[in-house]
Image: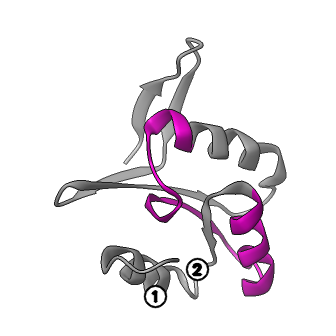
């Protein structure tokens, strides 16, 4: 939690949660409010970290599931809400598409 990274451009950033499960690494960012200003940066950071969509999660509190699917497809992150987070993460752990 609170893992500090330095991006290739020298910018410092804190990752909310970074977890290693076996040989895979999972990254989680959580937002309770405005996320639009951050989502493109997160999509780019996913690439810098070398993570796939199913290893990169954006948890948006109160987000509609249909809209979360749209955002996932648009930005290449796994966007979920607090209600379906565990189910989608379990699918990722089992190797299924988010």
**Which of marks 2 and 1 precedes in the sequence?**
2
Q: Is residue 18 left or right of residue 85?
A: left
Q: Residue furthest left?
A: 22
Q: From what the image shows, is residue 74 above or below residue 5?
A: below
Q: Kindly identify which numbered label has been placed on residue 82.
A: 2
Give the alpha-carbon distance from disc 1 to disc 2, as whole Å: 10 Å
In this view of the protein, which residue sits in the foreground, 86 or 43? Answer: 43
Q: From what the image shows, is residue 17 above or below residue 88?
A: above
Q: Position of residue 51 (x, y in %)?
A: 44, 48
Q: Residue furthest top?
A: 10
Question: Which residue appears at 46% of the width and 88% of the height?
Answer: 87
Q: Position of residue 54 (x, y in %)?
A: 48, 65
Question: Quadrant of the rendered structure where residue 79 is?
Answer: bottom right
Q: Which residue is mark 1?
A: 87
Q: Are marks 1 and 2 in contact (CB under 8 Å)?
A: no
Q: Which residues are magenta?
A: 46-74
The secondary element bearing badge 1 is classed as helix
Q: Is residue 1 left or right of residue 64?
A: left
Question: Which residue appears at 37% of the width and 82% of the height?
Answer: 90
Within-10-Å neighbours for mark 2: few <14, some 14–19, many 20+? few
Question: Which residue appears at 68% of the width and 73% of the height?
Answer: 61
In this view of the protein, which residue sits in the foreground, 56 or 29? Answer: 56
């Amino acid at each position: 939690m609170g893992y500090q990274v330095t991006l290739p451009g020298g910018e410092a950033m804190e990752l909310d949660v970074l977890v290693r499960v076996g040989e895979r690494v999972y990254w989680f960012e959580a937002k309770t409010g405005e996320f639009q200003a951050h989502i493109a940066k997160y999509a780019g950071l996913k690439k810098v970290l070398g993570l796939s969509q199913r290893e990169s999660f954006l948890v948006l509190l109160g987000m509609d599931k249909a809209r979360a699917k749209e955002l996932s497809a648009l930005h290449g992150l796994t966007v979920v809400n607090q209600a379906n987070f565990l189910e989608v993460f379990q699918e990722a752990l089992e190797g299924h598409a988010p």
